[in-house]
Amino acid sequence: MDAAFTEEQHEIRRTLRELLLKRCGPDGVKAAVRTPPGYDRELWRELAGRLGLPGLALPTAYGGVGCEPTELALACEETGRAVLPSPLIATAALAAPLILALGSARQREGLLPALATGELTGTLVVPGGQLATALALTGPNDGGWAGGGRAGGIQARPADDGWRLYGEAGQVLAGHTAEVLVVAAHTGGYARSRTLLFLVRAATTDGPGGRRDGGPGVPGLLRTRQTALDETRAQARLELREVPAELLGEGDGAEAAVTAALAATGVVAAAALAAEAVGAADAALTRTVAYVKEREQFGRPIGSFQAVQHRLADLYVRLQAARSAAYYAAWSAGSNGSGAAGTDGAAEPGAAALALAQALETLRTAAAEAVQLHGGIGFTWEHEAQLYFKRAAGDELLLGPVHRLRARAAEEAGLFAGGAAQAGAGGGPGRSGAAAVRAPEAVDV
């Protein structure tokens, strides 16, 4: 394994950081989240058109850049540093990988090039609070998280011209603006119960039912932007009343393929979100260090006090450990079976969940330290410290909590029932990699 970044990877990071420094300061972020879409459309078009951000990890055959999850994670680290409000995670880490993995040739050719260039945005729609479960990050995703044939979730039934979806979902990332919805719905009733993925071409961006060009929206689809703790991570509630949809893929669909694709997507999404959290924590630490050098108390900068130095030094060590874990998780997600990946080509079991847990915990600590060490100004609405604090809390609510991420990683690594036998059978290079990214013990509140 070569841990050094290539010149191309350095260039991706450098170019993106320079652009975001000019276009996405704290004032710009606060202004963007108060617009109807919740992000700066002009900046998004520039990021997509000039840098190809949403298509970084898509093949060139579908208009993408042809890079790996590592490049996407590096880009997400920079967007996290700026606390950028955008549909990047929803499009590039959730919708696009699922369409690539399960879509038919027609669906891939019709949707992926537009997603890669930012012409369309997409998202994954699952019942509220079940995103982490659907992506197999906090537990197995072969249960009834999509509704299980009972009340709740989204139900699908066949129709003469395709499928019809009925139900609702909350906390959908960028759900009020995404033009391509990948909807997880339960079908088959009790006898043939299964969860499949469906495509809905929403094509609505402004308002709950209207198109950007003033045309009619999708019949039966109502989308409402929700009030979220983290305004930079826009979420929506979707209500579907006999909404026309098409099955993602060909044939009748196989639930095993769907759950496998969701789990693989979860690995990429967790690595991307971990990198975002690391970038945000790095920015919070950098701003805090700059502040304690300037703020004076008792005739000297507070950064000269040993107690403050120790707190910041401990935070720096935690940040570097979280960054290493996030990089490893991204590399493992794109590995071809050599090095840390298993002999079957799968990513390191639990690496992404562990990296995400460590990154979220580090961001939470960095945000808390930023608020405290900034003193009274750190508690004000106008100061940027609140952006990092809300991002930390919001991300853990979305894909956490941390202790469940770690429990799931331990279960996948075989540390619970039958762990000794699995450890003996799997004591290859991959096992040493799991130890390398395991987060230090911490108390979860």
Image (tube, rainbow, N blue to C red):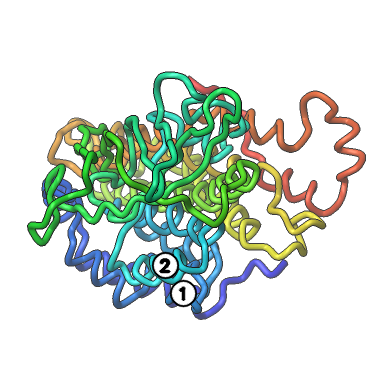
Query: Closest to the observer: 244 or 280?
Result: 244
Query: Closest to the observer: 442 or 161?
Result: 161
Residue 62, label in figure: 1
Counting from the top left corner in percent of width and height, residue 166 is at 34, 33
**Which amino acid type is marked by label 1?**
Tyr
Residue 112, label in figure: 2
| Residues at discs 2 and 1 in contact (Cβ within 8 Å) | yes
Which residue is rendered at x = 20% and y = 31% of the image?
Answer: 379
Query: Closest to the observer: 416 or 244?
Result: 244
The 10 Å Cα crowd at callout 2, few under 14, some 14 to 19, many 20 or more, is many
The 10 Å Cα crowd at callout 1, few under 14, some 14 to 19, many 20 or more, is some
Which residue is rendered at x = 34% and y = 69% of the image?
Answer: 114
Does residue 395 appear left or right of residue 266 in this picture?
left
Does residue 382 appear left or right of residue 259 in this picture?
left
Which residue is rendered at x = 48% and y = 45% of the image?
Answer: 197
Q: Secondary structure at mark 2?
A: helix
- Count of all numbered marks drawn on residues in the image: 2
Position of 167 relative to 206 (above/below): above
Residue 285, label in figure: none
Q: Is residue 434 visible?
A: yes
Counting from the top left corner in percent of width and height, residue 383 is at 17, 41
Q: Secondary structure at mark 1?
A: helix
**Which amino acid type is marked by label 2?**
Leu
Which residue is rendered at x = 57% and y = 37% of the image?
Answer: 137
Quadrant in the rendering for residue 312: top left
